[in-house]
Amino acid sequence: MVTTSTRPSVRAIAIGGLLGVLLMWPTGVVADTAPGGNVDLGLDAITISANTVQPRTGLVSVTGRIECSQDLEAYVWSDVSQVVGRVWTVSGGGDTTVECLAADGSADFSLSFYPGNGKFVPGRARLEAFADTGYCTEEECFYDDVSIGPMTVRLSR
């Protein structure tokens, strides 16, 4: 004898509950109003002024500057990759937080990092840098970002 039930299965209840939670979950509304981010929060540019390597340890240091037209705190990140030998690519990255005051118009940053694999050496490398700032209200989130690269640089001693 085959019996059928009109009770929903545990799986159906779980899926229905998950869909209900997702439909009620608060989401941010983002308006695309500025190039390089979604609004202009005053983060205007990022530049790299130097990149060095300590050949003995492989520690890379990247220095640069962010430009701002409003007071802000920015997260700055840089990634470096380098082909060592014929096929081996060494890569690593680092980050820092920088406070930029509109009255100054810019703020310097410096960050150092080791590669995740192998060792950086003096010579050609690929570098990217990125900075972003943002904030959220109860209804929506806003952010502004700038980037540079990827570009070919020379890691010097």
Image (tube, rainbow, N blue to C red):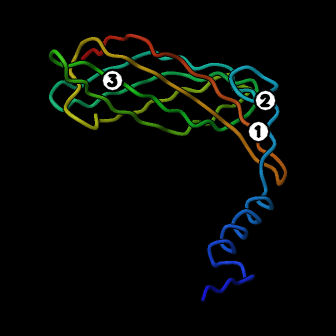
Amino acid identity at mark 2: Val
Q: At 81% across and 42% down in the image, what residue appears?
A: 29
Residue occupied by mark 1: 142
Camera-nearest residue between 66 and 154? 154
Q: Earlier in the sequence, mark 1 or mark 2?
A: 2
Camera-nearest residue between 112 and 30? 30
Camera-nearest residue between 24 and 143? 24
Classify 35 as above or below 119: above
Amino acid identity at mark 1: Phe
For the residues labelled 1 and 2, the Cα–Cα distance comes to 6 Å
Residue lying at the far front of the rendered structure:
1
Q: Which quarter shows the C terminus?
A: top left
The answer to whether residue 129 is left or right of residue 140 is left
Amino acid identity at mark 3: Ser
Mark 3: secondary structure? strand
Residue occupied by mark 3: 81
- Count neighbours of disc 2 (C-alpha within 10 A) and say few if under 14, some if 14 to 19, many if 20 or more: some
Q: Earlier in the sequence, mark 3 or mark 2?
A: 2
Please tell me the numbered disc located at residue 54.
none
Please tell me the numbered disc located at residue 39.
2
Q: At 75% across and 82% down in the image, what residue appears?
A: 6
Q: Which quarter shows the N terminus?
A: bottom right
Res 54 quadrant in image = top left
Q: Contact, CB < 8 Å: mark 1 with mark 2?
A: yes
